[in-house]
Image (cartoon, grey):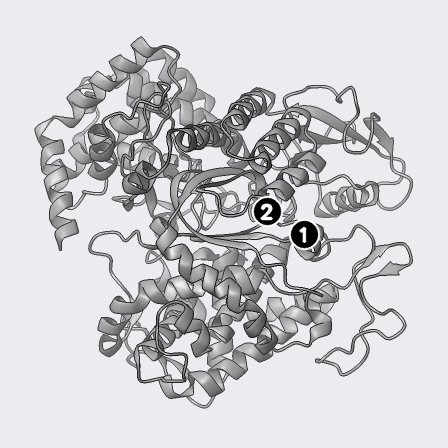
Amino acid sequence: MDATELANYLADSPPTVVPLEIKKHFEALSPRQKRYAHYISKASFAGTRIILRQVSPESEAIYDFILSLHRAAAGDWSGYAAKAGVSAQDLQYFLEYAAQFLGNSGNYKGFGDAKFVPRAPESAFAALAAGDETAKGFYEATKGGIFGTERQDLMHLGFTEEGHMTTYYPDSPSITKAEIEAVSAWMVEVKLLPENTRLRKTEAGVFEILIASAVTEVPAEGGDIGKETSFTVADGLLKGKTIKLVYGDHAKEMAAIAGFHAKAAEEAENENQKNMQLAYVKSFETGSLLAFKDSQRFWIRDKGPMVESDVGFVETYRDPHGVRGEWEGFAATVNLERTAAFTGLVASAQTEIPKLPWGAQFEKDSFLSPDFTSLEVLAFASSGIPAGINIPNYDDIRQTEGFKNVSLGNVLSAVAPSEKIPFIRPEDLALYEKYRGQAFEVQVGVHELLGHGTGKLLQETAPGEFNFDKANPPVSPISGKAIESYYKPGGTFGGVFGAIASSYEECRAECVAMALGCEFSVLKVFGFGSGEVDMDGEAGDVLYVSYLSMARAGIASLELWDPKSRKWGQAHSQARFSILKCFLEAGDGFCELTYKEGGDMSDLAVKIDRSKILTVGRKAVEDYLLKLHVYKSTADVVAGTELYERMTKVEQGFWAEQRGWGGGVEGARDEFGGDGGEFCGEGELGSGMVHFSEALQPPCARPKSKENRAAAQAHIVTTGGAAEARSSLEAMIQALVTLTKSLATSESLAEARKSLMREINQPSMGKSASRIRELRAR
């Protein structure tokens, strides 16, 4: 890989880290609620190593390498580096890499799935490792994985058969996409759910389904499909082959997770919370996803809790086959003020849903009013924190029992200091800056509730039984003919649409947000306008900025497209690019990209004709949305795939050239740090966010938060020169890792606190905190 190509994979310098404000929201909780949140947080972060193993073979060793160096440096990074003969600049690069690694829970970006490598030379890392035997051992265990760039295909997550990196199919260099699909088809046939599994093909050609569980043998009462663990495939590509169920994947972590959920059950405020936590215990101990589905049912029934959460193998974006889930978990508290707006959206849903471009036969038989709350994240273990969530993902539960929507308020409002805003024309910039937060909140709300929350899958629910009139099937609004395809028993959208399912569904939900975002009654729910059409008023401003924001995101999304593999690295980015193409194809001057002819395209910007949003723009979006929706509803994977691949294809020429300006703009994904809310919990490393907390001392002694807040805030200040940036990052890593592991005794915790306070009280930290206050004041 030449220097130009390598530049696309270098770690961000400096990484963009922003604080999540949580303190005031956590303080509003009762002692019991705080303990409940604490144990859920502990359960979530206990799965950090699972995420690492799901990213790359070297990620767990890199994690241990960083922690070992922290212990060896004992807070004096500069002294340790000097003794190792490592320059101040290379130390800075190490700290930046460590921050980005911890924020992404691995050495591939959580948003984009591309590998990042240090800016420091390999010799600097080797020198740092040589100063401590433990660190040296872990560094050697990475087997060159930190710096490996020889094969560009391996710089992206994807199928092994295509040369990419994946650990969802470990130790299986010869496994093919066709074999993975065949095993998935077998699992559907026997009704074994895939989310908590990995798949390994042995040298003997046996396919082992690795089930995440604390137990290492099939449970005494049997697993989800009984006590049998070895099966011979009867037909198809794998006819005669053996499939084995192997329990105990991530056994140590799953046992710890189950233990924390058992403690959370003791702090539950109602029977639904208690039963949810106990269902988690059963699921994580035994590997039962049927028990996990029960946990989601109790979760749905837990209406309006002050502490909201969800934990498990949930989202399937990073499995190249699109069915296996990445570990994640969060604990959050409700923002009652903002929740009022979302409650209003739920109340208006039955009025707004019929305005979507499909008929009643393609919509749920009845709208199951869900909880829709605005949450303030206390802790989120993942490879990256989303802005909103609509779960559970199980279609059978969603269609008949309901779902929940959450908007993560302190994620939505988190903005990096001095953030540049490309692709917006100068004349639009002031309006964009004023309303982009509000526009995004509306978009996320409609996306989650009325996007993911709408639509009916036409199914044969059991042999010979259908959820539509089979004798008089619905007529497709696209072809004008009766539908011919539908989901067979046990079939799911993810199972049928495979690898494109996640991005396809995100695109469908985004299009719903763009379509219903044009309804001024929806904008009124969020506090904008009177409900009457008024493109010149504040509601019109929010709508205009919403379309500008989507178009801008479509341009910036190209940074997540790899021109060598012609592969998209992120589901949402792929979706937003396709919507930009939809805007551009609308014609009539609705959407254009402006730039100086013959220039270097550095002035590239999006131009939306505000007067045509309600006509040309909305019609183009609804035409695209109708196709996406009907193909999904009818299991028409052929037509759906053809449509989506066309709309997400990055043509050579203009788009490939433009990517040079898209690159580096959105790639510096924010890493989040808690603001030191007085959270009951031992120190943990948050994956996806850096979570700082203190020891639980019943009855929930509320500790000082100054040290946590200062540590979290310090690491966003990297703009005051190299020395200040280095000292801030040193403090960040010091604070980050001091509280990383659960400390076994109160004495060791007390010592860690003292060490952390000594570091934070250094002059550089004081300057950092002052700088933060100055930035916030601005």
- Amino acid residing under circle 2: Ile
In-image side of 541 versus 299 (left or right): left
List x then y, in percent, for residue 140. 43, 21
**Residue under numbered circle 1:** 401
Quadrant housing the C terminus: bottom left
399 or 27, which is in the foreground? 27
Residue at 31 percent of width and 45 percent of height? 12
Q: Secondary structure at mark 2?
A: helix
Contact between labelled residues 2 and 1, with CB atoms less than 8 Å apart: yes
Q: Would you say residue 336 is visible in this rendering?
A: yes
Q: Residues within 10 Å of mark 1 (few under 14, many from 20)?
A: some
Q: How crowded is the residue under tag 2: few (<14 C-alpha within 10 Å), some, or many (20+)?
A: many
- According to the picture, the residue beneath numbered tag 2 turns out to be 300
Which callout, 1 or 2, points at the residue further toward the start of the chain?
A: 2
Q: Nearer the viewer, residue 667 or 143?
A: 667
Q: State the residue at coordinates (68%, 64%).
A: 366
Q: Classify 690 as above or below 568.
A: above
